[in-house]
Image (tube, grey):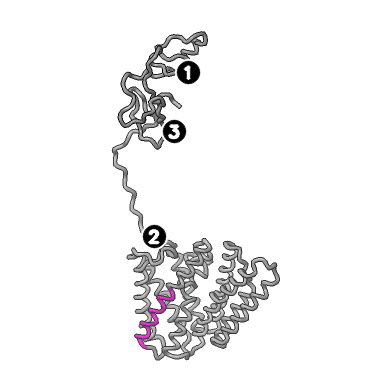
Amino acid sequence: MNESSWGAPPHTGPQAGYWGPSDQGPVQGAAPAGPAYDAPKAQQTRPMPIVPEGPAYGGDQDDDRGAARLSGPLFRDETPQTPPFGAVQQNSEPMSDAPQPAPPPQKKSAGRDLGAAIGVGVGLGVVIIASLFVVKAVFVGVVAVAVVVGLWELTSRLQERKGIKAPLVPLALGGAAMVVAGYVRGAEGAWVAMALTALAVLVWRMTEPPEGYLKDVTAGVFAAFYVPFLATFVTMMLAAEDGPWRVLTFLLLTVVSDTGAYAVGWRFGKHKLAPRISPGKTREGLVGAVTFAMAAGALCMQFLIDDGVWWQGLVLGLAVAGSATLGDLGESMIKRDLGIKDMGTLLPGHGGIMDRLDSLLPTAPVVWLLLVLFVGSG
């Protein structure tokens, strides 16, 4: 440590300015201290500063007058002391009074490639509408393919991020059968196919070691319910006489709800809806989803659904906005738990198939049930 950091009191004695013996030789102004004194070494020895006469302690100091007080960079918890006259402060930087430039304002970003998203959305819409109104069986096949791809994305992410091996083969086969059974046999067929798929998952997993069996089959049963079983309500709507119009109403209301939430939230959103789950969603966006969906529901029930009434569309739109938002938040919760942004990369600008089914899947049973209550099963 630099000696200048020591605050020693004056000492009276034969050698003024020298405080006690030292192995560094005499200090400046002192006579040689015997044969051990070496002049060349003394010239290399750094002299101790001469402390001026005067009291070393004030009234508020400690009473231990014989101990020097430590200070300097090793004792940063002490109050900084005024440097002695002539000392040069190190590591001192001049303060600049020049004003700092303000950061440039950031523009709001949509958060995705809108061009690719619109292009993919239009392409999917054409395929869906064409298959929906040409041959119903083709649309059932489209739903089955979407279910299988969604199951593949979900099980792949579970294995990659959590080490959970939900068996894909029985899920894919059972999921496709579930979708067909819902179209052919209705709710009864869908429940039977769901039970058989769950049983197949339990048996298939028995061919592997028992470690992790419980978590694997639990994830498998969850995947079977979450993706194909909820999707069967779409094909159950399709089975009615005006089935294509019911499915079209279901798709339009869900898309309009998502679009209203996105547009209003991006433009006016300030208050977070669920910041811990999905920071991008706002309460203003939810209001936009409800408003857009209720308006679209009134139009669809009045002009597309047989025996439908506009006020029923208001109720339907409100329910769709709620279920679509909950479905979106539910998948956001899954993705946060997995630590991923998207379930896949199959659809440019959208992510994966599951990123497009998140709002549709939980909305399907809601629309199916309300349409049955309002206008019957058809």
- Majority secondary structure of magenta residues: helix
Question: In the image, what residue type sits under mark 2?
Answer: Ser
Q: Is residue 186 visible?
A: yes
Going from the N terminus, do you reach mark 1 or mark 2 first? 1
In screen coordinates, is 315 left or right of 184?
left
Rendered location of residue 343, percent (x, y): 52, 66
220 in relation to 86, above or below: below
Q: Which mark is residue 22?
A: 1
Judge from the rendering whether residue 285 lies leftward or rightward of residue 182; answer left or right: left
Q: Does dot 3 land on a helix, a strand or a loop?
A: loop
- Of labels 3 and 2, earlier in sequence is 3
Q: Quadrant of residue 82?
A: top left
Task: Determine the secondary structure under disc 1.
Answer: loop
Q: Which residue is mark 2?
A: 109
**Percent x, y for residue 102?**
31, 47
Residue at screen point 35% across, 64% down: 271
Q: Answer few, some or many: residues within 10 Å of disc 3's Cα (few below 14, many 20 plus, some between 14 and 19).
A: few
Q: Nearer the viewer, mark 1 or mark 3?
A: 1
Q: CA distance from mark 1 to mark 2?
A: 72 Å
Q: What range is drawn magenta here?
A: 309-324
- Amino acid, disc 1: Ser
Q: Vertical placement of 310 versus 58: above or below?
A: below
Which three-letter amino acid code belongs to the residue tagged 3?
Leu
Location of mark 3 (residue): 74
